[in-house]
Image: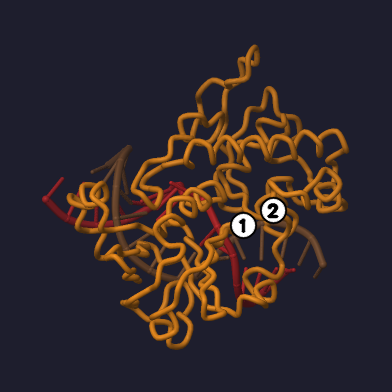
Chain colours: A orange, B brown, C red
Amino acid sequence: MPELPEVETVRAGLAPVLVEQRIQKAEIRRPDLRWPFPENMAVRLTGARVERLARRSKFLLAALDTGETLISHLGMSGRWLVMGAAPLAAFRHDTDRIEKHDHVILELEKGAQLVFNDVRRFGAMDLWPSDDLEAHRWLEALGPEPLGNGFSADTLLAGCSGRRTPIKAVLLDQHTVAGLGNIYVCEALWAAGISPLACAGRLDADGAARLVAAIREVLRAAIAAGGSSLRDFRGADGELGYFQHDFAVYGRAGEACRRPGCGGEIVRDVQSGRSSFHCPACQSGP
DNA sequence: CTTGGGACCTGTGAGC
DNA sequence: TGCTCACAGGTCCCAA
């Protein structure tokens, strides 16, 4: 489900109900997700007040007044949902299977509940000292934020230099730039006119500049649309994102390329076990 | 060091 | 109806 735009959508929806609220009770309903939860997580959360809710790449960072930060990752199917608000009650009604995968429930002041639901359990949570966050193993090796000043044609070119792997693999790997996933890599490469199969080491300065601009624009537009709802992504408020209607290539194998005057047909390839979509007519490379 | 493949886990839809 | 297979937005780990 969640790449950077979806995580940002969740952050924006969660912040108004979570920030400046105290966690009155933490119910931890299993010992782990992808990894074990931190020791005594319920105790360390209970009574803590959330001071800020930030995002780094695909991680949500809730800074607590205890000096620790609750780090969470949605994996493939994780969601943070706000319960107790009227609109949400309607959304939850017909789907009792959802409750089956509610793994962490945080009760806030004023009765609202935050529920972490994750069918596949590829998600993760940890608690870590806020003043040493960058040393956390999930965060220490992350590349720059794609929408931040640390990401540029120069840094992208440096990350691609000498690499024999396809450009798609470099963008999915979180070291050169952090936060992209399968959907937005495919979309950005299409927007830049570069094939996902193209050799990373052959990216030139012009291509790098186009790719950086394309990544930023695709992410910006997706965030503005509330992310993409394939299957079941929802924002924290239960709202659907709608960027999936704007996909140029993702999931469109056999359909016409949307670039004006192109006339090509989108094809699906499998690269290192994952679907890639591109238009052979207007995306350069092998 | 780089790279590709499998592993983790559950659910859904297509085809027989 | 029920079986099997392929596939799904992410990341880690290991062998070559």
Question: What's under tag 1, amino acid-wise?
Answer: Ser
Q: Residue at x 72, y 67 (%)?
A: A141
Q: Position of residue A200 (x, y in %)?
A: 79, 46
Q: Position of residue A228 (x, y in %)?
A: 47, 41
Q: Is residue A78 above or below residue A29?
A: above
Q: Residues within 10 Å of mark 1 (few under 14, many from 20)?
A: many
Observer-nearest residue: A163 or A117?
A117
Left-right relation of A194 to A50:
right
Observer-nearest residue: A59 or C3?
A59
Label 2 in the same subunit as label 1: yes
Observer-nearest residue: A203 or C7?
A203
Q: Residues within 10 Å of mark 2 (few under 14, many from 20)?
A: some
Label 2: which secondary element: loop
Label 2: chain? Answer: A
Location of the C terminus of chain A (image quadrant): top right
Q: Residue at x 83, y 43 (%)?
A: A153
Residue A145: mark in rendering: 2
Residue A277: mark in rendering: none
Label 1: which secondary element: loop
Mark 2 touches mark 1? (CB < 8 Å):
yes
Q: Position of residue A148 (x, y in %)?
A: 72, 49
Left-right relation of A159 to A45:
right
Label 1: chain? Answer: A
Question: What's under tag 2, amino acid-wise?
Answer: Glu
Left-right relation of A284 to A48:
right
Which residue position holds label 1? Answer: A57
Q: Residue at x 34, y 68 (%)?
A: A108
